[in-house]
Amino acid sequence: MDHGKLLCTIAVIGPTLANFYEQCQIPVFMFGLLLALEKQSWRWFWVLAILVLGIREDAGIMLFGVGVYLLVSRRHPRLGAMLCLLSFSYVAIVTSLIMPQISEDNPRLYMAVRFRQFVDRDDPTTLEVLWGMITNPIALLSSILTPVDRRVGYLLSHWLPLAFVPAMSAPAWLVAGFPLLSLFAQSGVSALAINLRYALAVVPGVFYGAILWWANNPAVFTPRVRRFWGFCLALSIVLTIVSNPNRSLSFMIPDSIRPWVFVPIARQWEHAAHINHVIRNVPNHVSVSATTHLIPQLSSRRAIIRLPALQIRDDRNRIIQIEYAVADLWQLQEYQKAFKDARSSFATIVPVLDKLVATREYGVLQVEDGVVLLQKGQPSNAEALSEWQKMRNEK
């Protein structure tokens, strides 16, 4: 099995075509760790284990799965026990003790939103969520198994590029099982989105289990099976392209068929030029609020938040008003007829901007191709205000 199979995996292509997140390091470090395990290169094994933990606070869940596999298979039970202890301790200490010292709301808000069914508090710790799972087995079982169709579809998406071999591999279930459980137990839609970064935590265990299964069953690898595997790989690529992961292939794949939503690449480039022309007028040192798709371009600012929010807590724990607001209303309007999130954002943001302009709390500085720039405490530019009013009358 070569790296080409990995590149045909929906769970690798999709997240890679999204924004760059820390999870993008998972395949490199985890596959390196598993290779070091097979070669019994223990120095590299522990170096890579530390690197895996450094990816993010919950990365220890992946190492815990490896440790359980080493214990159950009896290949390296002492190593497995050490890995389980290290990974569990790391997740518990970092999420319960270290992260709250940096920001109390971030880790606990995530726990409260994603695992609300297991806890009663609004700011639970990782250990409290874990205890809630242990003491509520029925709720845990319900979260893991339902809705069944989404869980089955998620597993099939991981198994397809490997000809469904991981479904028959005990090591695949053991190594990938704990990342899967952590995703299945969460509430919300994004946890089981195969095109999002969370899916990368499952990939190493699935592939490792398939490799071990093929190594133990070489006689099964007949020409007919090879042809079936090739079909699965081709189907995986086709489904990935057709799904337009994270709308990254919108230049050639429609975003929606019914209703029809397709913006040609020439029009996208034209709009991008207008975006760049507007946002270059936002100084580097100011605070800014922007619509979702403009945040990456403005992310070098010290203080940035997503519209419609216009206040932020600074380093001195003071609530301050944002200085600049920039909104790409063209993007929201183009996609709102097919996507609920764009429709909701458009319906929320436009009245906020209307109020800011009407009360003269913010002035309209620039309007280009549906991209609007406002500044706090400044009078509106007459031409820009006219363009804004014209655009609002056309909506």
Image (spheres, rainbow, N blue to C red):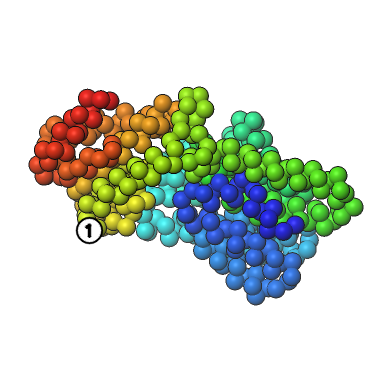
**Identity of the residue drawn at 66% across and 53% down:** 6
> Could you tell me residue 352's position as x and y percent?
23, 33
> Could you tell me residue 197's position as x and y percent?
53, 49
Looking at the image, the residue that sits furthest to the front is 266
Asked whether the viewer can see residue 239, the reply is yes
Few, some or many C-alpha atoms within 10 Å of disc 1 (few <14, some 14-19, many ≥20)?
few
Measured along the vertical axis of the image, is residue 272 above or below residue 2? above
Query: In which quadrant of the rendered view does residue 28 lie?
Result: bottom right
For badge 1, the amino acid type reads His
**Identity of the residue drawn at 67% across and 35% down:** 152
Front-lying residue, 227 or 210: 227
Asked whether the viewer can see residue 140, the reply is no
* Mark 1 secondary-structure assignment: loop
Relative to 36, 226 lies left or right: right
Front-lying residue, 127 or 3: 3
Looking at the image, the residue that sits furthest to the right is 219
**Identity of the residue drawn at 65% across and 49% down:** 8
Looking at the image, the residue that sits furthest to the bottom is 43
Front-lying residue, 77 or 159: 159
Query: In which quadrant of the rendered view does residue 356 lie?
Result: top left
Figure label count: 1
Instruction: Please state, as top left, top right, bottom left or bottom right, where the N terminus lies in the image.
Output: bottom right
> Could you tell me residue 11's position as x and y percent?
60, 47
Q: Which residue is mark 1?
A: 285
**Identity of the residue drawn at 43% across and 35% down:** 263
Front-lying residue, 333 or 378: 333
Relative to 74, 288 lies left or right: left
> Could you tell me residue 231's position as x and y percent?
75, 42
Instruction: Please state, as top left, top right, bottom left or bottom right, where the C terminus lies in the image.
Output: top left
